[in-house]
Image (cartoon, rainbow, N blue to C red):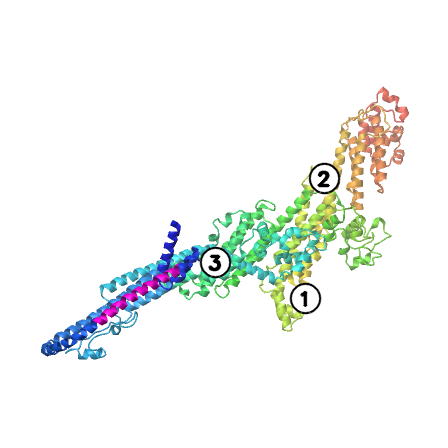
Amino acid sequence: MELDRRKVEAIKALLQDLASGSADQVPVCLRTALERGWNDDLPRYILMTEERKREEVQRNCKRHQEEFLQSVDQLVSIAGEAGSLLAGSERLGQAINGAGRRARGKADDLSILQIAQRHTAAAVLGMDDCLVVLGLVERIESTITSGRYYSALSTLDRVEKMLHGRHQMSYRLTQGGGRGLDDRMGGRGGLLAADDLYEPAGVEGSYVQAIQHNAFVRKVDEYITKLRTRIVKKGMAELNHWLLRIRDLSVPIGRAACERMARHLLFSRGFEVDVACASSVRKGSHGFEDGEAFGSYRNVPVMHGLLKLAEALGFEKWGDLGWLPKCVPSIFLAGNAEGGKGVRQVVGGISGGSHNSELLDSLEDELHSVHIALLIHAHFGELSGFQQYYTKNRLPQGELRAMHTVDLATMTFEDFSRSLPDTLAGLVGFFTIETKLLQESDQLDGLPAKQAYGDLWMTVQRDLIDVVKTQLDRANQLGYGGESGCEPTTVLCLKEELVTLSRTLLDVTGGTIDINMTHMLHFIQVGLRSAFDLSQKNWLKGEVIEILRDDSWQPLFVADLYDFKRLVAPLDLHSVLQLLDDEDLDEIEGAKNPLDLTTSFNDDLEDNQLFSEDYDGDPLLRSVGNMLNSAVPATGTQQEMRFPMTLPFSSAYCKTARALHRYVLHCCLFNLGSRTKAKSFEAVKATLVASGAGRDEDLESTRPEDFADASRQCEWLANALEEGLLDVYDVYEDFLVGREQDRYALSKGCQIYLDSVNFALMPDRLLPILSDAMMFMLGRVMAGSPAGQRIMDEALAVVGDTSRSAFETLAAKARDYIFITTRNEISELLAVLGQNVEVGGNLWTPGVPTTASHPWVNDVITFLRVTFMTKLTFLPTDVRDSLHYLACSHIHSEVIQRLATDAIPKIDVYGLYNLKFDLRELEDFADECGVIGLKDCFKELRDLVEFLTDVQIEELVADRRALERKYPNLPEPKAVAVLRKLQNLSAMGLAHTGSVNVPSIDQRKAQALANSLSAA
């Protein structure tokens, strides 16, 4: 019940307001009723109220009707008395005549009273003017409170016009009575009407203007001064609030502008997306799926463009494209509804793209507050003060240090990379807002001069370049792979951000603010390119180091076609056919179609050699070609190859080739969109073709600066690849000499040798890719012109000029390393020769003869057999033969040297006799190797042992000619040294001399023989 009572009272109060208020309150009351749910009760109570009012009106009408009838009755009764009054009037007439005579004497008094009446009426009208002024002042108060400053200023103008804007009214009295005054007042019997004395506010002749020195006017002036100060303060408060708010809006506004420029840049580069084509790019000829790597990015224009570039350079064959999204900033990936989270995960990303775009489109609305402040200060003539305040408080917001709470130069490179997009967006947003303000404002005198914005940009540009240089230098010093290291993808992303910043600022400020981008473009072309080169160097070295650390130093084992496509096929590393020129092809007998893998070559050659021995072309090409053709005969297509197979080079060579291929793609990506000329040659070509100038000569003569720029770009691209090849050489060389105690030392030396000779041909393998990169960079028109061809040929000539000889030198070092390592291994195995201790007895003084070789020689032969048959399989024949000679010569040298020196202090004749069996094993191994003349490495040792164990040794020493005929290779000084340390045989040993046919000489006789042989 209480609730219903309150509801009824509320409805009645609402109807009371509705009935007594203005028409403006009707919608408000109805909305209140509807919001409170009185939809059903309100009409009923309205009808009840209407009925009650109607009854009240009827009661009032009835009451007044009765009063009217009573008044009529009274008039009728008065009519009867009129006669008596008429008689009385006659009597009064006579009295009036007497009074008129008396009134005539009062004429002067009446004239004075009339003048007083006019002054009183004027005073009343003046008070009305004062009320109007006070009403306007009150209106100013309300408009200031509600923030309607335009209306407040307009009303303030009206008040000032009423107070001081018109001349003073003059009222003059006519001397001698009211006749002349009646004429001035329009003949109205000397009485002034109110409309004749009232003039609206601001109209000339108002009363307030006539009392300028009155206290009222002074008070109003004082209050107007306060209002003026209050308006100015309100305007400044609006400005300060705007300065705080617009600082936060600069980043999203700048983002939106950069995103639009990014879309424009993508379109200008031909990266507009075709969804059907983009979907088909997901799986190329290489057979690898890229959908997992890119996710929803596959339909993003920039990713579609990068995939086209990777396909143009053949890199998609490696199936390693997951790093491509890291090469572009988030603004190029924005707008992808499906991939918002992925953008943030990959490159930091930005969100709220549609909201940012709406902010940019409605930027005029955001400038309302500053326009109000400008209008207020312009109204009061204080634009210079506003300009000083705005310059002091707004321009510092456009400085680089104001874009972030932490100094960008002191951040880690990782934090710097994440913060830079917002920083650049803030700069773009600042200059976009200021440009819009300059374009929209009519009070330019109150804003900073355009030169001030240009000077600010020069400062910001210098600071930004210094910060980027500092960060890049610090990151590159840390190298690749560190926590704050710099990767090429990061520099590529940074380059795109700086290019987008430059192009966006030039676009949004064009024609309003003079933005000089000379230093930024120079930094991108020179400073940033140098940092990119260093990051490329660190990245490539780091990649190769990681590859070599994980490598097992074994020939590449290709298990199936998938491995072949993933590691070998992208650059056809298994063949040199694509490297042959016409002259080389002519040298290959029976070559019908050299580029057809189904064609077999030189069936008459042994070991499936591709080149004959009398091939007079590139010897390195012949060596590598025969090596590869022996491993993978060119007798079928990839699908017809037999798997598994083993290729001579290591997996590190394939992975390094992939890294070099990606290295070239990095360089091409850096050149993409970073040319110094904003207008592309394709645009010039379109203009020329439209005008009829379509010949190459016309193109060359029309834009020579484009060809100069193209020459610089191609030269840099070629030099970068050459530097990359030399960096690979440095890493391989470090790995060759940097691990002396490596248990894979010999395998490592062999693989580095094989990889090096293949790397020596890597420039030739990469030249077509580099040529495609240059054509992609220059465009078909420029690349197809004679001048463009000359530029590309001159640049391509640089590749391989130094790197090929460097890798050939590395191969020679690796060959020497193989020789040294093999010799050291043999020396370690032969160390037992100086110990005179072996299983079963003494080695050099056994005292009795044996019938078998010693374990040390079996160990040496086993080592050599394993080495020659496995680790040296793919080495060229001349290197393998040289290593055979080196190994056998070293064994011979080690044994004979130990025999002739104090390394073996004592020896008996049975020690020499037993050495014959060891020597026989070594000679049999030499014959087994199939190397011509390899057995001759042991001839001196053979003659020495045979001579010292010859039963006719005394006769031979006496007969020099017989000695030379029988043992022509005898090293006599070493024979003398062995005889001098020959020991006597024991009784048991002497008992065996006849059975084994060895000389029976004692130590004294051996010394005599040594003296005789030495004297001879």
Quarter of image, res 706: bottom right
Q: Main secondary structure of the magenta part?
A: helix
Q: Is residue 931 left or right of residue 553?
A: right
Callout 3 amino acid: Phe
Using the numbered discs, state the Cα–Cα distance from disc 1 to disc 3 in whole angstroms: 44 Å
Using the numbered discs, state the Cα–Cα distance from disc 2 to disc 1 in whole angstroms: 52 Å
Labelled pair 3, 2 in contact (Cβ < 8 Å): no
Tell which tag, 1 or 3, sits nearer the viewer: 3
Q: Which label sits on residue 430? A: 3
Q: Is residue 983 left or right of residue 491?
A: right
Q: Residue 343, position in %: x, y?
A: 58, 52
Callout 2 amino acid: Ala
Tell which tag, 3 or 2, sits nearer the viewer: 3
Residue 444 on the magenta segment: no
Q: Which residue is mark 2?
A: 745
The magenta stretch spans which residues?
45-73
Q: Secondary structure at mark 2?
A: helix
Q: Residue 769, position in %: x, y?
A: 69, 56
Callout 1 amino acid: Ser
Q: Which residue is mark 1?
A: 785
Q: Is residue 978 left or right of residue 506?
A: right
Q: Which label sits on residue 625? A: none
Q: Which one is in front, 475 or 898?
A: 475
Q: Quadrant of the C terminus?
A: top right
Using the numbered discs, state the Cα–Cα distance from disc 3 to disc 2 in whole angstroms: 62 Å
Q: Secondary structure at mark 3?
A: helix
Q: Which one is in front, 188 or 311?
A: 188
> Of marks 3 and 2, which one's residue comes earlier in the chain?
3
Quarter of image, res 450: bottom left
Q: Secondary structure at mark 1?
A: loop
Q: Residue 626, position in %: x, y?
A: 80, 50
